[in-house]
Amino acid sequence: MSRSKIEGKKINAYEKYLRENSRPPSKGGNTKALHSHILEIDGENYSFLALGSQQWVFKSDTVSFEYEVNDGYKNIDKETIVTIDRNGQPIIRGNRGFKPKLRTADSREPASRREQRS
């Protein structure tokens, strides 16, 4: 596993994908669920897992971070992400927290268990 660094680059694209089981809005929604975040820089994809669907970097920002290559994937060490906005000021975006337990239960239809049996 080699560790490398990207410094002062602009992103070409930013994508987010839900990694946990989906949950309806009435039960809290997916805003704070685990998402895979993928940054495209100069045609290369770099990714990290984080809570929430909030974007950490915008196209007008420059970003620096460290990453490791594991099985062909470039995994960003999210603690090293530094975002500089268009005015040259460092800014913190996205949900930087963590949760000890991920969702495992599937969402179910809005009916009682008894109604589901029949």
Image: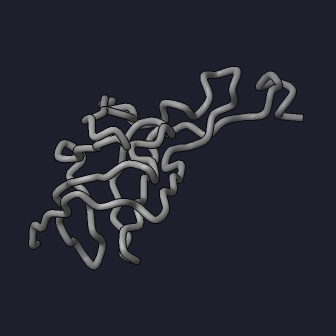
User: Which residue is at a point 80% across and 27% down the rendered structure image?
Assistant: 110
User: Which residue is at a point 69% across and 30% down the rendered structure image?
Assistant: 24
Residue 18 is situated, as x and y percent measured from the top left of the image, at: 53, 48
Left or right placement of residue 104 versus residue 45 in this view: right
* Camera-side residue of 20 and 35: 35
Which image quadrant is residue 86 in?
top left
Asked if 60 appears above or below 112 in the picture, the reply is below
Which image quadrant is residue 111 in?
top right
* Camera-side residue of 6 and 16: 6
The residue lying furthest to the left in this view is: 2
User: Which residue is at a point 9% across and 72% down the rendered structure image?
Assistant: 2
Asked if 65 appears above or below 103 in the picture, the reply is below
Quadrant occupied by the C terminus: top right
Color encoding of the figure: one colour
* Camera-side residue of 56 and 52: 56
Quadrant occupied by the N terminus: bottom left
Residue 53 is situated, as x and y percent measured from the top left of the image, at: 51, 40
Residue 37 is situated, as x and y percent measured from the top left of the image, at: 42, 53
Asked if 69 appears above or below 98 in the picture, the reply is below
Left or right placement of residue 66 versus residue 48 in this view: left
The residue lying furthest to the front in this view is: 87
Left or right placement of residue 91 versus residue 117 in this view: left
Residue 99 is situated, as x and y percent measured from the top left of the image, at: 33, 29
Asked if 36 appears above or below 118 in the picture, the reply is below
User: Which residue is at a point 42% across and 59% down the rendered structure image?
Assistant: 38
Left or right placement of residue 6 versus residue 100 in this view: left
- What count of labels does the image hold? 0
